[in-house]
Structures are given as structure tokens and as C-alpha cells.
């Protein structure tokens, strides 16, 4: 069994093991997760497809776990390097944001602001590739 926990200022843990995000600094070596924005798909098909193609071209792999909270936990554990998704609700990401930050990662919106608990977009990764990854996703958004 795995239990991811975090407390602001005290770190993030998987069971009793302290978590740290990966240290990869090159997008070409990164394993990336995404959510498929089923509810928000209409009108964004071209943009989301362009984002997926850009990630596939520039990163080492792309996967879909099916839940944003697990994607964020896996970034915190260093199992995955980056993630993006549209249409997330606060309950989808609130705990994961804390776990990522406490493990040394960065989280923001694709648009670049920090209003993370408002419904919308989310991008997360280790600090080394965050700006490059967010820029890649933002460039191909609609």
C-alpha cells in the first residue's frame, strides 16, 4: 500500500520515505503525464492534439494515469517528470499541489499565473524543466 502525505514546511512523504521530484533538466529525457479533457474537449481538439504531438516529439514518453492526484503524486516521487491538464477542480489538485511543492517541484497554470484552486488548467514538473515544459504546452494551446 502507498500513502502520499505532506505538511507545509515539513516535506512530502510516501509512507515513511521522504519524496523528491526528479532532477532531470532536459525535456528530451522527461516522462510526461496528461489528462484528457473530456468535458473541455469541444473547441480545443486541435490545441490539445498539438500539445500531445509537441510532447511526443520533445519528451521521452507520454502516459495517462487517469487521475490528476496520482499524476501529481508520481511527480513528487520522481516516477514521472511533468503533467498538464484542463478543467480541473480544486478537489482534484489541492492535496497534489502541496505534495509537489513539498517535494521540490513547481505547479502553476498553463497561462502562467498562480490561481491554482480556481477551475482551469494545471501544469506541474520538477523545477529544472518547469519553465520549458509550461512554455511548450502554452505555445500549443488554443
Image (cartoon, grey):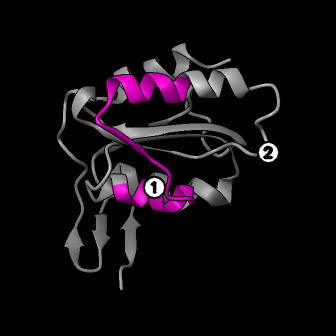
Q: Position of residue 71 (x, y in %)?
A: 45, 55
Q: Residues within 10 Å of mark 2 (few under 14, many from 20)?
A: few
**Residue 141's quadrant in the figure?**
top right
- Element type where label 2 sits in the image: loop
Image x and y of residue 32, in percent: 39, 41
**Which sits in the foreground, 8 or 120?**
120
- As displayed, is residue 113 above or below residue 21? above
Which element type, helix, strand or loop, lies under badge 1?
helix
Is residue 88 placed above or below 54 in the rendered structure? below
From the image, which quarter does the N terminus lie in? bottom left
Looking at the rendered structure, which numbered label has been put on residue 117? none
Counting the numbered discs, the total is 2
Name the image quarter holding residue 92: bottom right
Answer whether residue 57 is magenta in the image. yes
**Vertically, is 96 above or below 6?**
above
Secondary structure mostly seen in magenta is: helix
Q: Residue at x 19, y 30 (%)?
A: 25
Lower position in the chain sequence, tag 2 or tag 1: 2
Q: Is residue 25 above or below residue 122?
A: above
Question: Which residue matches tag 1?
Answer: 71
The C terminus lies in which quarter of the figure?
Answer: top right
Disc 2 designates what residue? 39
Alpha carbon distance from label 2 to label 1? 19 Å
Residue 133 placement: quadrant: top left
Residue plotted at (38% across, 72% down): 4
The stretch of residues the image draws in magenta is: 51-74
Q: Find out whether residue 110 is within the magenta segment.
A: no
Amino acid at each position: 500500500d502507498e500513502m502520499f502525505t505532506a505538511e507545509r514546511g515539513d516535506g512530502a512523504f510516501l509512507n515513511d520515505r521522504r519524496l523528491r521530484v526528479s532532477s532531470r533538466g532536459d525535456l528530451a529525457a522527461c516522462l510526461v503525464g496528461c489528462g484528457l479533457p473530456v468535458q473541455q474537449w469541444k473547441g480545443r481538439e486541435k490545441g490539445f492534439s498539438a500539445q500531445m504531438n509537441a510532447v511526443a516529439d520533445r519528451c521521452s514518453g507520454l502516459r495517462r494515469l487517469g487521475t490528476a492526484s496520482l499524476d501529481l503524486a508520481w511527480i513528487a516521487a520522481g516516477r514521472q517528470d511533468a503533467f498538464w491538464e484542463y478543467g480541473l477542480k480544486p478537489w482534484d489538485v489541492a492535496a497534489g499541489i502541496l505534495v509537489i511543492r513539498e517535494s521540490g517541484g513547481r505547479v502553476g497554470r498553463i497561462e502562467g499565473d498562480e490561481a491554482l484552486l480556481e477551475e482551469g488548467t494545471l501544469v506541474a514538473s520538477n523545477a529544472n524543466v518547469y519553465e520549458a515544459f509550461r512554455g511548450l504546452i502554452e505555445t500549443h494551446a488554443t
